[in-house]
Amino acid sequence: MAVLTKSGDGVADYLDKCPDTKGLTAFGGCPDTDGDGISDNEDECPNIAGTKALKGCPEKVVDADGDGVPDADDVNARRKGTAATMGCLDADGGDGVVDKEC
């Protein structure tokens, strides 16, 4: 009998913690994008390898402009933007289109 897994990772959907994403059996079907041994669903910095002690981040997460986007992921870490625009400004009310100068 074939195992039902819509993501194709070999983890049966009823056991898969991330059924819509191809992941690793060791992480219950969730991926580990940065390869740090912490599954993305538990990693606060899933694109930067870190430590378990820092919840998957390499060091204390710095957000210099206070916009909620860590500097490592922020397109412009000197100007406050939004998480939806990766830290860029969207001054005209959140239409999702970033200002000319991010």
Image (tube, rainbow, N blue to C red):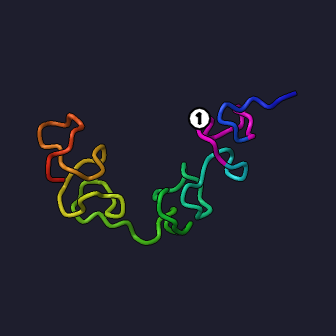
Where on the picture, by quarter, is residue 15?
A: top right
Helix, strand or loop status at disc 1: loop
Query: Which residue is rendered at x = 26% and y = 53% of the image?
Result: 87
Q: Nearer the viewer, residue 2 or 61?
A: 2
| Residue at the front extreme of this rendering | 100
Residue 83: image x %, image y %?
Answer: 30, 47
Query: Which residue is rendered at x = 24% and y = 37% of the image?
Result: 96
* Disc 1 packing (10 Å; few <14; some 14–19; many ≥20): some
The answer to whether residue 56 is above or below residue 100 is below
Query: Which residue is rendered at x = 40% and y = 70% of the image?
Result: 60
Residue 33: image x %, image y %?
Answer: 55, 55
Task: Say left or right for 59 vs 28.
Answer: left
Task: Say left or right for 5 vs 58.
Answer: right
Location of the N terminus (image quadrant): top right
Query: Which residue is rendered at x = 62% and y = 62% of the image?
Result: 37
What segment carries the magenta color?
10-23
Considering the whole magenta stretch, tell me its main secondary structure: loop
Q: Which residue is mark 1?
A: 20
